Structure formats: C-alpha cells, structure tokens
Amino acid sequence: MAKTVQALLEDIRFLDEEQFKVVEAIRVLVRKTITPVSEEVKYGGIVFASGVPFGGVFAYKEHISVEF
C-alpha cells in the first residue's frame, strides 16, 4: 500500500526538520506556479502532476532532489 503524502511528510520531518522545511517550500512554490496540480507518493518521493506527471521532490539522507 502506498503512503499518503501527509505520512511521507511526517516521516521526513521526524528524520530531518530542515529537509522538511525545504520540501514544504518546494511544494508551496509548485502550487503557486502551476494550477491545477496534484501530488502522489511515488518512487519514494512526492510526484507532481497537472494532467500528466511533470516532476517531483525526493528527500534523501543527505540531500533533496527536485526532478522535472
């Protein structure tokens, strides 16, 4: 069963508060820039879609990846 976006965010926050803040800032920027936008947990991160998937944000142990 796939995690919810909220559950993934809680895990990220538990492991690293700074990474959580960066991931949240990226989510805010995406939502302000692209409408409509949806999010789902996929490939271990949050994938963004607007009709079709177009990118995602992935938190790793020592870095964050933003992919398009």
Image (cartoon, rainbow, N blue to C red):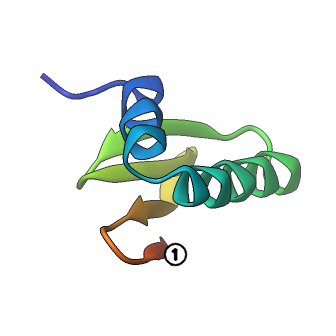
Q: Which residue is mark 1?
A: 68
Residue at 47% x, 37% y: name it: 9
> Where does the image place residue 23, in percent across and percent down from the top left?
59, 55
- Mark 1 is surrounded, within 10 Å at the Cα level, by few (under 14), some (14 to 19) or many (20 or more) other residues, namely few
Outermost residue to the right: 32
Q: Is residue 53 above or below residue 55?
A: above
Q: Report the amino acid beneath label 1.
A: Phe
Say which of 18 and 2 sits in front: 18
Q: Is residue 7 left or right of residue 53?
A: left
The residue at 59%/59% (across/down) is 18
Q: Position of residue 43 (x, y in %)?
A: 23, 55
Q: How many labels sit on residues?
A: 1
Question: From what the image shows, is residue 19 above or below residue 50?
Answer: below
Of residue 39 and residue 25, the one placed in the foreground of this image is 25
Q: Residue 48, image x and y in percent?
A: 53, 50
Residue 19 position in % (x across, y down): 54, 60
Left-right relation of 8 to 20: left
The secondary element bearing badge 1 is classed as loop
Q: Is residue 34 toward the left or the right of residue 42 in the image?
A: right
Q: Quadrant of residue 59?
A: bottom left
